[in-house]
Amino acid sequence: MADDTDIDELVLAGHGGALHHADDGVDPNEARRDALERRLKCEVIRVAEEAAREKGVQVSPHVAQCLTELTMAYAEHLAEDLWAFAQHRRGKIITHEDVLLAVRRIPAVRESVQALLPAERRKKQTTLNLGG
């Protein structure tokens, strides 16, 4: 039976290969980042292919590559925002409030994050009525 790495390599081979190739002597953090990118790419491809199957269409390798690049870019941007929000409040730990702030303009994601919180941590959404 193939392990996840073998399966990932097969998925990657069918969709344009790895985002970056690891070289010998690479900084351990860079190697970890590369492994995360490959894993993320595989998961994005699997989700896209599953959604495509449900709709009776196929995902081209070019589109799969674009989706994975966009997803990685968004993840990096989100991580930078979360760090900045924690730094702004002089925190050393990223909290659920940082996450809620980062996804404030994406209602479905905000609702999903809220649903994962314990009831006592959920905030009531207030709306500002600007009409007079």
Image (spheres, rainbow, N blue to C red):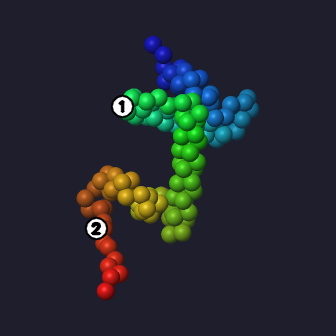
Residue located 40% across and 34% down the image: 51
Q: Nearer the viewer, mark 2 or mark 1?
A: 1
Viewer-proximal residue among 113 and 45 = 45
84 shown above or below 26 = below
**Residue bearing the label numbered 1:** 54
* Residue 123 spot, x, y in % from top left: 30, 66
Is any atom of residue 57 visible in this view? yes
Say which quarter of the image contains residue 55: top left
Q: Answer whether labels 2 and 1 touch (C-beta < 8 Å).
A: no
Q: Amino acid at mark 1?
A: Glu
**Residue bearing the label numbered 2:** 124
Say which quarter of the image contains residue 48: top left
Q: Amino acid at mark 2?
A: Lys
Q: Quadrant of the N terminus?
A: top left
Left or right of 48? Residue 125 is left
Viewer-proximal residue among 103 and 1 = 103
* Residue 35 spot, x, y in % from top left: 59, 34
Residue located 34% across and 52% down the image: 112
Question: Please, which residue is most extreme toward the bottom here?
Answer: 132
Is any atom of residue 96 visible in this view? no
* Residue 100 spot, x, y in % from top left: 41, 60
Image mark for residue 12: none
Viewer-proximal residue among 123 and 55 = 55
Cα–Cα gap, marks 2 and 1: 36 Å
Judge the density around disc 2: few (<14), some (14-19), many (≥20) Cα neighbours within 10 Å.
few
Residue located 25% across and 59% down the image: 119
Say which label, 2 or 1, has the lower sequence index.
Answer: 1
Give SS at disc 1. Answer: helix
Q: Quadrant of the C terminus?
A: bottom left
